[in-house]
């Protein structure tokens, strides 16, 4: 990587790798896996920019630069597959991310009129747990217990 790209390419990819290790180690954290997915998507964009800006002309293309650019393109081609697998891992851990475009039922009508949509969890099937029937604290005195044998 040192032959072709600036340090920002390596820092971006290695920091996403570190967040990915964190996401794998902490199996119960949805935040870690979401940060890893966001980092992967962001590095797809920055990798495209790095490759397009720092690609050398043909007369300056040495073997080391050709290998560097080939590995960068190979890494870029594998990132969508990695994003899909990380998204599946996010769903397995209980995460649910839906994109709501329902502008009529939006709670913030100012943003809805200006064309800004909301993204987040789908709360249409939300079930409140506050109103559950609690078991009685004391046994029912109308029922008599059988004597022990």
Image: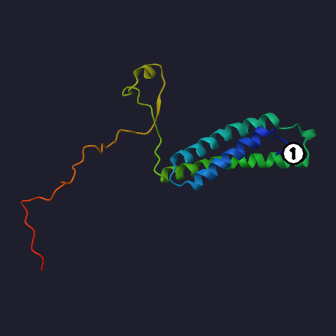
Please name whichever residue, 30 or 62, is drawn nearer the observer in this view of the structure. Answer: 30
Q: Can residue 81 be seen in this view?
A: no
- In screen coordinates, is 36 left or right of 115? right
Q: Can residue 82 be seen in this view?
A: yes
Residue 63, image x, y percentages: 90, 49
**Image: 6 above or below 24:** above
Residue 2, image x, y percentages: 84, 44
**Residue at 76% across, 43% down:** 10
**Image: 10 above or below 25:** above
Q: Mark 1 points at which residue?
A: 65
- In screen coordinates, is 71 left or right of 132? right
Residue 86, image x, y percentages: 57, 50
- In screen coordinates, is 34 left or right of 21? left
User: Quadrant of the image for the C terminus?
Assistant: bottom left
- Label 1 SS: helix
Task: Decide: few, some or many residues near mark 1? Use Cα within 10 Å; few <14, some 14-19, many ≥20.
Answer: some
Numbered label tally: 1
Q: Residue furthest bottom?
A: 149
**Residue at 90% across, 39% down:** 58
Residue 75, image x, y percentages: 72, 48
């Amino acid at each position: 990587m040192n032959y072709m790209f600036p340090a920002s390419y390596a820092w971006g990819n290695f920091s996403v790798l570190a967040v990915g290790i964190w996401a794998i180690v902490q199996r119960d954290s949805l935040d870690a896996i979401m940060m890893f997915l966001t980092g992967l998507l962001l590095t797809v964009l920055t990798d495209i920019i790095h490759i397009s800006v720092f690609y050398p002309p043909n007369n300056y293309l040495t073997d080391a630069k050709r290998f560097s650019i080939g590995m960068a393109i190979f890494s870029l081609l594998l990132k969508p597959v990695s994003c899909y697998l990380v998204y599946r891992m996010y769903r397995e851990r209980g995460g649910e991310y839906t994109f709501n475009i329902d502008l009529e039922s939006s709670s913030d009508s100012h943003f809805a009129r200006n064309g800004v949509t909301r993204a987040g969890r789908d709360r249409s099937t939300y079930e409140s747990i506050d109103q559950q029937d609690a078991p009685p604290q004391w046994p029912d005195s109308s029922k008599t217990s059988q004597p022990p044998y």
